[in-house]
Image (cartoon, grey):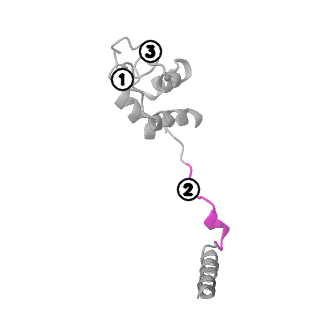
Amino acid sequence: MKKHFLKFLILCAILFNVSCENDSEKDLIDITPVTLVTYNNNVKNIVDSNCTTCHNDPPINFAPMPLLTFDQVKEAVDNRELLSRVSSEDISFLMPSGGPRLPQATIDVILQWNTDGLLEQ
């Protein structure tokens, strides 16, 4: 009985291994297109939802500038430490001011936008 059971297990293992083959290299390569993060498609909604309460025109609550347009947000990334402010762990430096830190996935979108070249569209 043990011999039959052992043969059965070996046969199952062989069939399992044979059925898990890929005949094509194409099946093994992830062909998901890489999409670039852009201001209009990804970042604008984040800024509008989390920043424009204070960074409006005119800015309030001691915000130094508005963040309503692509050019204004790009300027804040290039020259006003926006990336450091949104990704900071220091509550005294963190933006949004007085609020909880943005979710890491949201911060990652903004950081990826910078990596992708701060594209508008």
According to the image, label 3 marks what residue? 92
**Which stretch appears magenta?**
22-34
In the image, farthest residue toward the front: 1
Query: Can residue 120 be seen in this snapshot?
Result: no
Q: Are marks 2 and 1 in contact (CB under 8 Å)?
A: no
According to the image, label 1 marks what residue? 99
Disc 3 to disc 2, C-alpha distance? 40 Å
Decide whether residue 24 is among the magenta residues: yes
Q: Is residue 110 left or right of residue 9?
A: left
What amino acid is labelled 3 in the image? Answer: Ser
Given residues 100 and 25, the one toward you in this image is 100
In the image, farthest residue toward the top: 62
Given residues 86 and 56, the one toward you in this image is 86
Q: Residue at x 64, y 73 (%)?
A: 21
What amino acid is labelled 2 in the image? Answer: Thr
- How far across and down, in percent of the image, does residue 55 sit? 37, 20
Mark nearer the viewer, 3 or 2: 3
Assign the magenta stretch its main secondary structure. loop
Q: Are marks 3 and 2 in contact (CB under 8 Å)?
A: no
Q: Residue at x 56, y 53 (%)?
A: 33
Mark positioned earlier in the residue sequence (1 or 3)? 3
- How far across and down, in percent of the image, does residue 38 sit? 49, 38
Tell me: residue 121, above or below residue 79.
Answer: below
Label 1 Cα neighbours within 10 Å, binned few <14 / some 14-19 / many ≥20? few
Mark 1 falls on what kind of element? loop
Mark positioned earlier in the residue sequence (2 or 1)? 2
Q: Is residue 76 left or right of residue 12?
A: left
According to the image, label 2 marks what residue? 32
Mark positioned earlier in the residue sequence (3 or 2)? 2
What amino acid is labelled 1 in the image? Answer: Gly
